[in-house]
Amino acid sequence: MRGLKHGLLLALICALSLPAGAAKVVASKTKEAAAKPAPVERSAYEQAVQAVREGRIAEAVPALHRQLTATPGHINARMLLATLLVDGGKLDEAETVLEPATDLASLKVLARLQAMRGNPAMALASLKRGELEGAMQGEYLAFAALLAQEAGLHDEALAYFERALQLPDAKPQLWLAVAVSQQALGAPDRASGSIRRALKSPQLSPDSRREGERMLRDLTARAEIRAREAAP
């Protein structure tokens, strides 16, 4: 079961991740998305965007720091700077840059970094700071559920899973993750039911289906052992 838990968490983290070299993509998109700032703000940020486009990362990073010093709420500057730092392997610095964030997009990246570095409880706490914005987003709820599960908070994980599964875009593999927490809480019958529910879905991926079938065989075998042990 632990393998599935980690696999689901990693899959979701990867879905939220920016690929290597993503800074140029972020730079090209965030320039258009940024609110119209005052000239001094536009200078530092736009200089950084131009520098990224031309591959001059060493110039972009200090420009973005200047932008955030002048306007700490500049979301695009914060995201671009964090992306550059992650691309450069400077994860501690990226976390420091993201820590003051209040927007959900930045908090997701911060939580992703913290989870990948083995601190799911801290990652969950960071993600929860954006709960008002993410309360009805399936991706947010699933991510929060998996972080809670990884931190051993299975009751909280099930509460998040329940909310995520009520949304129309819920993925069937979430039922497999639900089963992990149900088994951890000592409810193997409920876990088997959740797995069967996932397996009934034609949308379940082949890999998830194989994992679900393996989980169900494991639970069935354990139930048979318990029954033999309980027999007079």
Image (cartoon, rainbow, N blue to C red):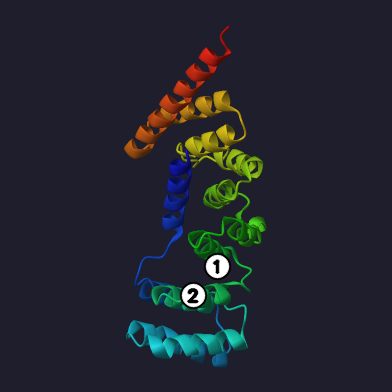
If you read the primary sequence from the N terminus, does the residue marked by circle 2 or circle 1 appear first? 2
Image quarter for residue 25? bottom left
Quarter occupied by residue 72: bottom right
Circle 1 is placed at which residue position?
Answer: 106
The amino acid pointed to by label 1 is Ser
Visible in this render: residue 124?
yes
x, y percent for residue 176: 48, 36
Q: Is residue 57 above or below residue 26?
A: below
- Pointer 2 with pointer 1, Cβ within 8 A: yes
Instruction: Indicate the position of residue 65 as horizontal and vertical percent values.
Output: 53, 86
Image location of residue 102, percent across then percent down: 64, 68
- Please say if 43 is above or below 16: below
Q: Is residue 44 above or below residue 162?
A: below
Which residue shows up at 63% across the image and 46% down it?
A: 153
Residue at left 51%, top 25%?
A: 192
Tag of residue 82: 2
- Secondary structure of the residue carrying numbered label 1: helix
Q: Secondary structure at mark 2?
A: helix
Residues 229 and 121: in front is: 229
Marker disc for residue 182: none
Residue 172: percent from the left, percent from the top?
A: 46, 36
The amino acid on which the numbered mark 2 sits, given as a three-letter code, is: Ala
